[in-house]
Amino acid sequence: MRYLICYDIPDDKIRDNIVNYLERFAWRVQYSVFRCKLDNEQAARVWKDLLAIAANSKGSSVLMAPLCKSCEKNLRLSTKPLEVEQGFLVV
């Protein structure tokens, strides 16, 4: 399933940690919005990791929303995404 992950992190260091973590497996749609494809086990681990990274940042919020195929098909974006989703070849 695909997920939309959004965050509002006021602390620069923690926000950078979130970005570095998400950039390993997700595509950046906007500065604080990422999209990724995860199975249930991966999604649970990512959610746990995001909460752990953001735990010490007062006033932070993280949203991880599953996107069904119908919902994803109807997403609209007014500008080009910051990154283009591409497949990966693991060797």
Image (cartoon, rainbow, N blue to C red):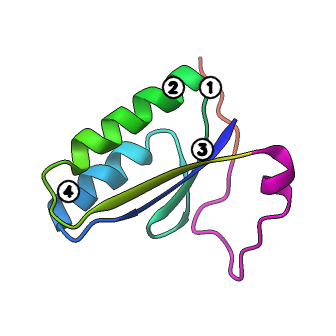
Task: Sort mark 2 into few (<14), some (14-19) or many (20+) by Cα contacts within 10 Å.
Answer: few
- Residue 14 bears which disc, if any? 4
In the rendered structure, which disc, 4 or 2, sits on the residue that comes first in sequence? 4
Residue 12 image-quadrant placement = bottom left
> Looking at this view, is 46 or 61 the one in front?
61
- Does the magenta portion include 81? yes
Tell me the amino acid under the disc marked 1: Asp
Task: Sort mark 3 into few (<14), some (14-19) or many (20+) by Cα contacts within 10 Å.
Answer: some
User: Circle 2 sits on which residue?
Assistant: 42
User: Circle 1 sits on which residue?
Assistant: 39
Tell me: residue 88, above or below residue 57: above
Tell me the amino acid under the disc marked 4: Ile
Residue at x 26%, y 58% (from the top left corner) = 16
In the rendered structure, which disc, 2 or 3, sits on the residue that comes first in sequence? 3
Element type at marker 1?
loop
In the rendered structure, which disc, 4 or 3, sits on the residue that comes first in sequence? 4
> Looking at this view, is 26 or 65 the one in front?
65
Disc 1 + disc 2, Cβ < 8 Å: yes
Element type at marker 4?
helix
User: Circle 3 sits on which residue?
Assistant: 36
Residue 65 position in % (x across, y down): 58, 50
- Does the magenta portion include 84? yes
